[in-house]
Amino acid sequence: MPIFGHSMGGHGALVCELKNQGKFQYVSAVSTISNPIKAPLAYKATELVKKYTGPALNMLVDQGKADNFYVEEQHLPVNLSAALKEGLYKNGDQLSKKSKGCDHSYYFIAKFIEECINHHAKFLFQ
């Protein structure tokens, strides 16, 4: 079963996967808050991914480069990428990308959703 989320829900999807190792086949997040500054460490995806030792961690994170939260360095997807590199876990399919010209709106989700569904389907029908 895959899980998907946008913005705060994207962070929630990442946390659900990381705290329930192996429950989800794939997680994808769009315009996600990757590193909420004021969240407790037990609920920060960037901290959880450093300690992840579960089964294959397959994720797709897409951040719009025109997203005002990204521009103002509030989402901090770079911290999630760094945490994946320094973490204990080095397996699975992790893709973090930045889409030029995309903001935080419904239109970005509409652009991203087909790719997201195709990635989820790849894991559902294995």
Image (cartoon, grey):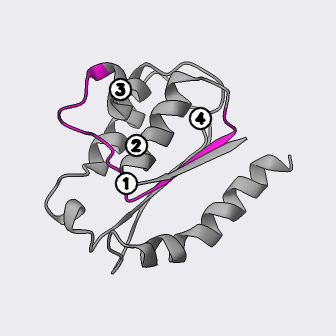
Q: Is residue 32 magenta?
A: yes
| Residue placed under numbered mark 3 in the picture | 43
Horizontal side of residue 57 vs 34, given as left or right: right
| Residue placed under numbered mark 2 in the picture | 11
The kind of residue tagged 1 is Ser
Q: Residues within 10 Å of mark 1 (few under 14, many from 20)?
A: some
Q: Is residue 29 magenta?
A: yes
Horizontal side of residue 54 vs 107, given as left or right: right
Give the structural element (helix, strand or loop) at label 3: helix
Question: Which quadrant of the rendered structure holds the N terminus?
Answer: top right
User: Do the numbered discs 1 and 2 sit on residues whose CB atoms are within 8 Å?
Assistant: yes
- Which quadrant holds residue 70? bottom left
**Viewer-nearest of discs 3 and 4:** 3
Q: Residue at x 80, y 48 (%)?
A: 124
> Magenta part of the protein: which range?
24-41
Give the structural element (helix, strand or loop) at label 4: loop
Q: Main secondary structure of the magenta part?
A: loop
User: Do the numbered discs 2 and 4 sit on residues whose CB atoms are within 8 Å?
Assistant: no
Q: Residue at x 68, y 62 (%)?
A: 117
The kind of residue tagged 4 is Leu
Is tag 2's residue or tag 4's residue first in the polypeptide sequence? 2
Identify the disc placed on residue 57.
4
Horizontal side of residue 58 vs 63, given as left or right: right
**x, y (%) of residue 46?**
34, 33
| Residue placed under numbered mark 1 in the picture | 7
The kind of residue tagged 3 is Tyr
Q: CA distance from mark 3 to mark 2?
A: 9 Å
Q: Residue furthest left?
A: 72
The kind of residue tagged 2 is His
